[in-house]
Image (cartoon, rainbow, N blue to C red):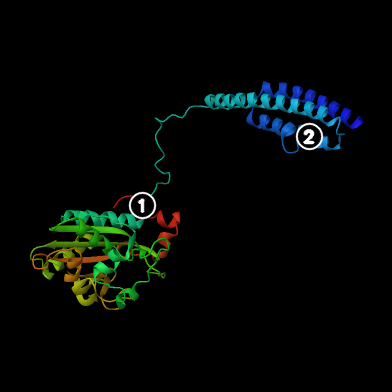
Amino acid sequence: MSETLDLIKMTSDAASEFEIALGSVRANPTPDAVEALRLLFIGRKGKVTLLMEGLRHASKEQRPIAGKTINTLKQQIEEAMSSLKEASANWALDEKLKQTPLDISLPIDHMAPQGSLHPVSLMRRELLREFRRLGFSVFDGPEADFDFYNFSALNIPEYHPARDMQDTFYLREQPNLLLRTHTSNIQIHCMLNERPPLRIVAPGRVFRCDSDPTHTPMFHQIEAFVVDKNISFGHMKGVIDSFMKAIFGSSMKTRLRPSFFPFVEPGAEMDLQCVQCSGKGCRLCKNTGWLEVGGCGMIHPNVFESVDYDTDTWSGFAFGFGIDRMAMLKYKLTDLRPMFEGSYSYLGQFSRYT
């Protein structure tokens, strides 16, 4: 009986304390003061919370009386706190309105740090600008694609040894679904949806299990291809030479070396005259005077057959290279990996414009 009377008296004392504190906070309802009042009375260790916990010591007969008294106080406090929160929001708004307004007509500080574009973005912009100048249209395709588009339709059947050259990320969600290993998959998507003549450039991200100073698991490629009547190897060499001179300067020399790629026949490697020593021989080009930048060739008849193009009517060429690699050559970078580590001190050195 005495414990119950004590609880009721303590509840009455808590109600009186709350009324005094409430009056003080109402006079200046700052967010901090409102929160402090809430914690003092109905927080996890608040006065009313402790009174509720004290009910377990009251007798069964007297517990309902004390419980009702404490609950009534709790409801009154919660209603008051709801009103205080609204008053607190209005107080914060008034304080904000009292602040000195920002004068947007003031001149900006030209010495303030300015943003920059990623070197790969800069390189991609420049490449696409030159491709458009040569009459190419940009075509996009999926990064997660089916085996058919990434391999089979490109004359790389299931057991072809060329698949071993590309460590592929396969996805578990669906059979034969993978992260594309090159942007050549766009070539198949485009030819299945468009009819010749075609002059297409396809940039994008590609993925392979590879990591060293000149390779990352995710990197960027760009591929260009032309399909028309009477297209020859000479047309391809002329386009490549004109394109590389537009990017690296009119004195830049290019060459093609015979090589094998399953989706072209004949195929070749594209080489640039070394950008560091201008062909004299240095450490970068391993004293050869040349740098390998990509692959090219005449589109294989099997690729045309997979997209239902008449090989007696149409011929074409394709060539592709890494955008990241081109950025390294353009900006004279020695390691590819810092470009993808998000360091402002590194990336901030590049311009916002090409």
Residues 1 and 38: in front is: 1
Quarter holding the N terminus is: top right
Is residue 208 toward the left or the right of residue 255 in the image?
A: right
Instruction: Reply above or below: 118 against 315.
Output: above
Q: Is residue 171 above or below residue 350?
A: below
Give the SS element for disc 1.
Answer: loop
Q: In which image quadrant can residue 345 be found?
A: bottom left
Q: Position of residue 213 (x, y in %)?
A: 40, 69
Image location of residue 145, percent across then percent down? 33, 61
Measure the alpha-carbon separation of dots 2 and 1: 61 Å
Residue situated furthest right in the rendering: 2
Query: Which circle, 2 or 1, is nearer the viewer?
Result: 2
- Locate residue 147, reporting x and y percent: 32, 66
Decide if residue 349 is on the left or right side of residue 139.
right
Helix, strand or loop for disc 2:
helix
Mark 2 = which residue? 52
Please indicate, yes or no, whether residue 240 appears anywhere in the rendered image: yes
Left or right, 90 with respect to 311, comes to right
Q: Nearer the viewer, residue 302 or 348?
A: 302
Please name the residue shown 34% across and 76% down the image. Answer: 164
Residue 300 in sight in this render: no
Q: Seen in the image, is 163 located left or right of residue 81?
A: left
Q: Image quarter for residue 229?
A: bottom left
Counting residues from the start of the chain, the first of labels 2 and 1 encountered is: 2
Residue type at mark 1 is Leu
How would you rate the neighbour count of disc 1 (Cα within 10 Å): few for under 14, some for 14-19, many for 20 or more? Answer: some
Amino acid on which the number 2 mark rests in the picture: Met
| Residue ID at (43%, 44%) | 112
Q: Nearer the viewer, residue 212 or 1?
A: 1
In this figure, which residue is indicated by the disc labeled 1? Answer: 117
